[in-house]
Image (spheres, coloured by chain):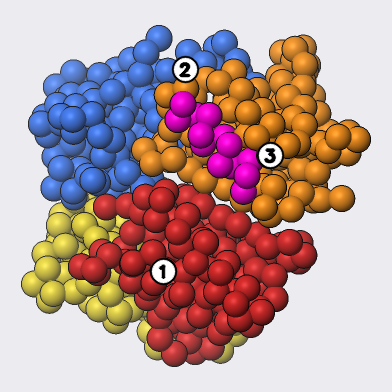
Chain colours: A orange, B red, C blue, D yellow
């Protein structure tokens, strides 16, 4: 099972709609498939230079470890050395702050992940969850 | 001047529509802004694993050197050592085959680039050009 | 909008003049354009070996995250794991101490960034701000 | 012995003046000191995205191997595997086409190097030589 392009595009559209409705700062939203490959993405105008790299790092981290990046955030506060080492081990793209959310189907199977960056981490995560819900799928943001 | 998100999304939609109408193999289309940053992207279902990296490399190469990747293709055949060295110098993402197309406005200003990968290089380039034209912008694919 | 070469050169000259007038230690000043590309630079005689890499990392970090590096300094003290991860995610060049300053026009649009390194971080930042002001532009150093 | 900042700035100014007088395409000029560190640089407006990386690669290659990049160009045509391996060995920045020129004093001592990129390789090299001569120093471009 893997996310389809039409689902990924619906998620991106849902993230952007939520961000606009909440007047969030300019964000980037990236959807990866279950293999960690880029499926769909959009960066709002006026976003800062490397937003897509941060968004990707959140999505990469969630998939890499099989948990939403809020769980990685908790682990980073408890065991920063682990997150640092894991980042190196996976090749440098793993950003352990909220906003990297697993995309699951109704049965709990992982279909991919979403990474959002540009506003506060909490807002980024809320937008990711709104986008996933708008596509009729289930988001897993991880736990504090 | 930089490409806007709505323009980038129109280009991606135009590329996908062209690819579907021509029954091309599953492709990835990536639009970068003038800063070389990810602006919009879509990967068709059943695309092979690293299509997005190849598409990105075409788009990166075109922007890096200021010419469509068909011109880099020509140079690669004439001076393979130059392309190899340039790839290293710019950090590893530069794919010198057709399918990386500069996006220009009517005045010739570079607004960004598109990279397409998944079918033949010639078809990839045709899809990129079709997508750019569908957004009312001008594509520069480079020259043999 | 992007910084012009004559503006970037004026900023570098202003930084050097300030550093000399304050008898700062030998510094490097680097100006990046809004794309994150090298626009102008100067390294004073007797600067230590890797000053330009540190100056560049300050300028890169400010642009990458869209905030002066003093804000990244604050975040690094609060969430060191985030800065470490972001550094990896953006490719290794992000130095989160004062001295990386966004260059803005009167309307607040980001035109590029300046990185200064060689003296204390506070002095480096003061020199960056003096250089930007000398070119008639607005510097944003970030906040503690 | 090492190049001084005032000399490096004179070289950059001389390169830009030559490029403008010959109506060359927008270039980047970078001066490295004898240690391979960035001493001075300028990128003309409208240069393509990665011109500074290519210019730096020419200057790095000349210093790395102790010969102007025209000699590396000759070697690349004869032994491409050597240039490819050397590029990897030195960390990726070595561009073996004309335009990387050693800066020497009257006694033949290497003070640094200049890299120019943006126009044809021959024009880039001519601009580098003009800039070095304008600073009263001796340029060594290498040999075919």
Cα distance between the residues tagged 2 and 1: 45 Å
Q: Write down the residue under mark 3.
A: A135
Given residues A113 and A3, the one toward you in this image is A3
| Residue C111 shows in the view | yes
Q: Residues within 10 Å of mark 2 (few under 14, many from 20)?
A: many
Give the secondary structure at mark 1: helix
Residue B54 appears in the figure? no
Is C62 placed left or right of B88 in the picture?
left
Which x, y percent locates residue B122? Answer: 56, 84
Is B29 colored magenta in this rendering? Answer: no
Residue at 32 percent across and 52 percent down: it is B2
In percent of width and height, residue D19 lies at 16, 70
* Pointer 2 residue: C73
Foreground residue among A48 and C62: A48
Query: In what element is the residue under mark 3?
Result: loop
Q: Position of residue D17 (x, y in %)?
A: 11, 64
Report the residue marked by disc 1.
B134
Q: Which residue shows up at 52% across the image and 16% down it?
A: C75
Residue at figure coordinates x 36%, y 24% from the top left: C68
- How far apart marks 1 and 3 lie (CA) works out to 27 Å
Whether A67 is drawn above or below D16: the answer is: above
Total labels drawn: 3
Mark 2 vs mark 1: in front:
1
The residue range painted magenta reads: A9-21
Mark 1 in CB contact with mark 3 (< 8 angstroms): no
């Amino acid at each position: 099972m893997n996310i389809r392009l039409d689902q990924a595009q619906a998620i991106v559209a849902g993230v952007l709609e939520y961000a606009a409705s909440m007047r969030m700062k300019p964000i980037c939203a990236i959807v990866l498939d279950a293999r960690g490959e880029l499926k769909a993405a959009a960066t709002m105008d006026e976003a800062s230079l490397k937003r897509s790299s941060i968004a990707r790092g959140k999505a990469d981290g969630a998939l890499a470890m099989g948990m939403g990046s809020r769980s990685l955030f908790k682990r980073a506060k408890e065991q920063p050395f682990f997150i640092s080492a894991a980042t190196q081990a996976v090749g440098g793209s793993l950003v352990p702050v909220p906003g990297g959310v697993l995309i699951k189907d109704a049965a709990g199977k992982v279909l991919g992940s979403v990474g959002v960056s540009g506003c506060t981490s909490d807002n980024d995560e809320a937008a990711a969850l709104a986008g996933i819900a708008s596509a009729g799928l289930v988001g897993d943001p991880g736990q504090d």
